[in-house]
Amino acid sequence: MILLQETAPGKLNLTLDILGVRPDSYHELEMVMVSVSLCDTLSLELETGEPWTVVCNVPGIPDGPDNLCWKAAQIYFDAAGTDPKGLRIQVEKRIPAQAGMAGGSSDAAAVLRALNRHFGRFSDEALRGLGLRVGSDVPYCLFGGVALAKGRGEILTRLPSLPDKLCFLLAKPSFSVSTPALFREIDAVGVSARPDTTAMCRAIASGDCGAIGGCLQNAFEPLVAARYPAVETLRQAMLAHGARGARLTGTGSVVFGLFDDSTAAQTARDALRGICPTVHLCTAIS
């Protein structure tokens, strides 16, 4: 038996813009994203001699072909022309599920990284191409760090690291959001809060914490906040406790605040624990 291990960082959207529907029915996106230190941990056992299985510490995660980890492994082995002779994937989840943090996509990317580190069949670019067949967020999760993403999310440009002192506070309310339903709704009503992606890229390049916080924006947030008042409640609570900015990530439901340092973020975390069931502190990964 061969054992491979890999970490899967979560991601946050500093900006998220929807530019329209593409001819292939996917949406044209423009986003600035950052990997964060809240991570899942994966263990892959090859040559088990047993049927494939996915095991997770969190109830309700698919354990068969519908799991993105399984799908990533299948795509990898098909492309490589390799049979693992049995596979067991164990996922220790810390990233909240259905949170807008690409937890499932990051787990799938970790599977691709671990397999390619072992077998060494594909370049980084080719591996991201395989990842795109798994899901739109997987290429970024393979790329990681601070990046500008365009297209479906697969056209990636490296951006400078965020200032080391910055800290994120994450709050996951009890509800979750259907991503396909939210895309259908925004197609119907249009985008009412469009980020200034160029300004965010400038703010990151300058290392200006206040400017970065001021440029946070998510085109989905008005729709989600109108349906779930907890989004605005959490945002205002973070701002009241010193966040430079606070927004929804992805299609939600995690709301995150950007803080100058961990001390301020810890104070805000303690205050939010009374109104939100799940809160985490994390930092950026470059």
Image (cartoon, rainbow, N blue to C red):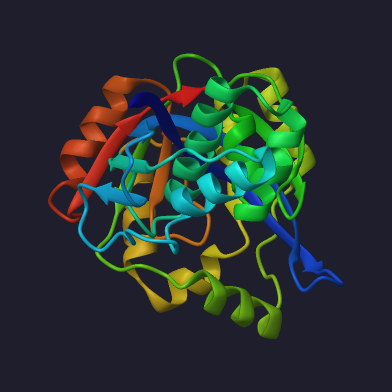
Q: Residue 126 location, x and y as percent?
A: 75, 35
| Residue at figure coordinates x 53%, y 41% from the top left | 83
Quarter in which the N terminus is drawn: top left
Q: Is residue 206 above or below residue 65?
A: above
List the single residue furthest toward the left: 274
Q: Is residue 124 visible?
A: yes
Q: Is residue 243 left or right of residue 194?
A: left
Instruction: Give the image quarter of residue 88.
Output: top left
Q: Is residue 167 above or below residue 156?
A: above
| Residue at figure coordinates x 34%, y 55% from the top left | 97
Q: Is residue 231 above or below residue 105?
A: below
Q: Is residue 143 left or right of residue 73?
A: right
| Residue at figure coordinates x 62%, y 29% from the top left | 146
Q: Is residue 40 visible?
A: no
Viewer-proximal residue among 188 and 109: 109
Q: How many marks?
A: 0
Q: Residue 176 location, x and y as percent?
A: 35, 67
Viewer-proximal residue among 71 and 26: 71
Q: Is residue 268 above or below residue 150?
A: above
Q: Residue 26 location, x and y as percent?
A: 74, 68
Q: Is residue 57 left or right of residue 193?
A: left
Q: Residue 60 location, x and y as percent?
A: 25, 63
